[in-house]
Amino acid sequence: MKKHLLSLSLFMCAFIGFVMAQTINPLHVDGRVYFKINDDVNLNVVQDEGKINPKDVYFLQNLNAKYAISNLEMPFLSAKSDILQRTFKMDFDNMEMVEELIKELGQHPDIEYVENAPLFFISVVPDDPYYDTELNGGFLFGSANASWHLNLINAEDAWDVTTGDPNIVVAVLDNAIWVDHPDLQGKVVSAVDLGNNDDDPNPPEPTYIWSHGTHSAGLIAASSNNGIGVASIGYDISLMAVKLGDDASDGQSMAAGFEGIVWAADNGAHVINMSWGTPQYFQTMQNVVNYAYNLGCVLVGAAGNNGNGMETQMNPDIPINYVGYPAALEHVIAVGSCDIDDKKSDFSNYGTWLDVLSPGGYATQGLMGIGAFTMLSTTYNDAGDMSGLLTGSTGGAGSFGVSGKYDIMQGTSMAAPVTSGLCGLMLSANPDLTPEELTALLKSTCVNVDAQNPEFVDSLGAGRIDAHAAVLAAANSVAPLTADFIASQVVIPEGGSVDFTDLTHGTPITWAWEFEGGMPNVSTEQNPQGIVYNESGAYEVKLTVTDADGNEDYELKTYFILVGDYVGGASSAWVEQNTTFPNQYRGVFNIQIADPQTAWILTYDGTGGSITTDYAKTTDGGITWEPGVFATPDEMRPGDISAVSGDKAWVAMYDGVASAHGGIFHTSDGGETWVHQSTAVFNSFCNSVHMFNENDGVAMGDTDGGSFEIYTTNDGGDNWIKVPGAQIPNPQSNEGAWTGVVTGVNNTIWFGTSTGRIFRSTDKGENWEAFTTGEANVSRISFWDEQNGVIICQVFNQTTGQVTSWKMRRTTDGGETWNPINISGGHQFSDVSVVPGELGMIVAINISQSIGDNFSAYSMDYGTSWEMLDDSIQYTCVQFYDAATGWAGGFNMDANYGGIYKWKGIPNQPIYFASSPEAEVYEYELYNYDIEVVDPNTYDEEEGEEAPTLVISADDNLPAWLNLVDNGDGTAKLSGEAPQAESPSDAYNVTIYATDGENEITQNFVINVITTNLAPEFTSDPVTSHIAHLLYTYNITASDPDGDDLEITAVQIPNWAELIDNGDGTAVLTGTPTTTSMIGFSVKLKVSDGIFEDNQNFNIVTTSNQPPEFTSEPITVGEINEEYVYNVTAIDPEEQELSFEALVIPDWLSFVDNGDGTAVLSGIPTEGSAEGYEIKLQVSDGPNNV
């Protein structure tokens, strides 16, 4: 694996009724669901432009026929998001079974969630003739200003700040957009029809409802000051037309909303307008919004139009004043509508989730002006009169003298685009605003309208938008002054010079440079040139800048300029080389060293992170690098490379479009040609290749057919033979391999997996073993020899991209067991390489967006102690061949500067620890650490030089149970009996010192004392179903393997229950529930032995008590003076104890309850009764009487 339909309706209020074609649920798309597979699941199926055969998917095999699954696809195929790449859209014909499908599919362990596909509803000083023009609708409809909405938000004053930047693009995601409208010509810079899968976003017919998107587009960015039509708040900003509606639909429902957001984000939209919504939350919707937000998009959503309940009258399934989505989602600006007097439009939804109000309602002028003139903008239909408003064929602008392709609409659908246009204007004033910063400025500059809306205080967001205040605030918030700079080179010989370039953000007017060790050592130029460094050392550079307002900032880069051979904390260990790629910012992600003179590198695009087909090689130790482009199919991307010379190399490539398959390509002419070695078929993802020599090699992929797909060759790849699955350990659930996480020494090869296992072969890939590491992932592997190696185990959060877990482990037995490395200083690294031939030596790099967090470092004691080599240099990866040969990847600035760093070595290095401590010991066991300190320097005894005595000592705070003995020969022993652990693992900090009389070094580490205590566990099964109004009893038992005293406590229990701990490992949970609960009352219990604990969590589902019933038929005829006997029987559905009672019987009868669910009614009548004797019997189970 790589190292790394939704139906809509527009929020337009007006007088349009809801047209519902849905038959199962009017809020959902019939016969469609979205689902996401877990982050660690690898589907491994063939897809064609996102289409997948449902029969190929293992977790659908038992569902295809049952639900008549007809379509499965990856709707976000182009999205650069693991979350969206794992989200699928599925259609099925048995649509009435949707809830059963959601439940059944959702129970599969590989599925994260399944949900319905939502149906969104339509929320529906220039010289332009309809700008600031009074329009007269006569006595009936009154008069209104055509651009009242622009006047209300102070648009003219905003245009005095900026009239918009055409480079700012607002995406209109709507049913359709007529891009050839005279007032939109030249404004649409990109367009797509996702409803019909073509590039024509125009409506299928010139109707009022199909004009919804055209109306929104005009409100955002209709051409202004062009002598025709209307003006827009966005003025000169540009539009992106994203059609979501299917031409065959009614124009109110759309089937590509999610896809539209992703398409807009991927194609350069700065703002995304969404004038549609639903009253329901969907996880897929939030995931899509997160994706666009993370790409820097500002998202604006219409709040919805059911604040007055009118939609509910037409469709009872729509709640009154619902929370509208996507408007209410995180990272979306939720927009409500107001009228000309700043009152909330009666139709507009409201609530604490709202962000702002924007004009979208009525211009309340004239006798009947309310409800007549609303928002005038561009349309595909011709303006009609008010009579057409009742039929939904027009908005009625013609009754106000408007003609041509312009009409009026109202709704939060109109309020949202006015806000989106303003967001585009704000970005024109300051394009560096982040979505969070823009939203904060937009809200902070709103006009408070609480006085006009006293009944909606705290439910209208920050208030009504103010364009002038918002744009002015954006212009005044140009990126804060942030000092930064780069150097032409950072590693130079004595007497070398460096040019510096200012990269400060903001508008500085003064520059103050300080060059430690440089000549001159100060400068006030913006870009100082020719700063000379004459003496060996590692020097810092500081830049202080100020702007016109007196703001000041500085950037200090330590160990930045490395001159000559420097002895000390940082070392001039690297020499910068030029990869000569013509494209800027090519980052190196893979280095393959064939011999001390020959190396090959693979690259990625540093501006976007995608893998490129650019590679380079050197055959002279890096003095010159020869760039090239893989002559392979366009869709192929390299994941790993293995080379044996400057002529012969093999590259593992995968299909970058399908993110799967691929194969091995070989060159024997130094990269001039690349031949596909097709016998390595790769039904799975092609990950890695490793050549032991020019004949023998191994190629590896992900799992295929129940085992990892591995091939071997003994003829240079002319023939690749697939290794039988029986010779490879079975993969774990969702286990895959990574590109490039492979290494080999002699005949042994290892690779790491996504579940934290190491696979090893000692016979060049023919037979394999698998070993656990104790971690959840292996992201880097490096070996000194067949026995000694290290791994990095790094786990990323797929949503945030943050590292959630990082560990480094070491093996001394070829990978069978892995022990954690106690790393002093808390360092974490993005890549490491052991140095073959120098056992214990590791070189590491770290890459970060924060300049100061980039560094390289080395360790001589297997990774415990680290010496910094430099910082503030962005290294990308590292690889060593031997102690004299290694490279660290970087980024090239251009074809003439930078890209990779050659290892120069650590001259005159000080003493160092050559031993690494054990990190763990069990309580009461003996801990031993044999310490070794090495002085690498040589001394000439003939010249009277004597080797200094090495003294090893411990910190004063050495744990009392440890003792250190210095042997006086550069070795020492740290030992002691580990004490009893008071927790699962007690950490003891240890600091060891070593000195040669002049230099002192330290080794800091942690010894974890592990308890031998075993955890207790619950041994009883909870009672999870019960009947309301009856006593509930759960007799709890627990045991402890060590016989420790146990305490049982309740973390959470219902308020009707109590827990009694008997103190002997048993407890009782008891109580009487008085209500029913189908979800169940949550119970969380805990048992603890003082160190470990076990938890038992369950729900108690309570159902209503079913009444008992009589099962006997009463005898209704008797004879005088003859004994009457009626044997009464009854049953209870819950088998509860029953009691009988005679409520009404004649005096001559007696009633006896036998106590076993039976009773006897008997007696002798002495006289007859024509009407009969009245008898009433009752049976009771406690709560119910019958």
Image (cartoon, helix red, strand yellow):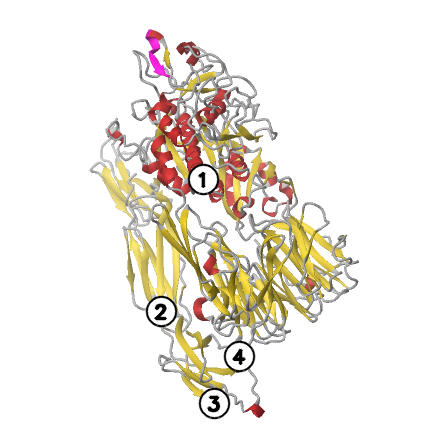
Closer to the chain start, of discs 2 and 1, is 1
Q: Pinpoint residue 161: horizontal percent, then vertical percent.
A: 39, 32
Q: Which residue is mark 1?
A: 431
Q: Gap between marks 4 and 1, in whole Å?
A: 54 Å
Q: Which numbered disc flags the more N-terminal residue, 4 or 2?
A: 4
Residue designated by label 2? 1089
**Residue 914 got which mark?**
4
Image: 383 above or below 1009? above
The earlier-in-sequence mark between 3 and 2 is 3
Point out which mark residue 967 bears.
Answer: 3
Boundaries of the magenta span = 139-145
The foreground one among 162 and 964 is: 162
SS for callout 1: loop
* Disc 3 from disc 2: Cα separation: 43 Å
Q: In terms of image quadrants, where is residue 767?
A: bottom right
Residue 20 visible from this viewpoint = no
**Mark 3 → mark 1, Cα distance in angstroms:** 66 Å
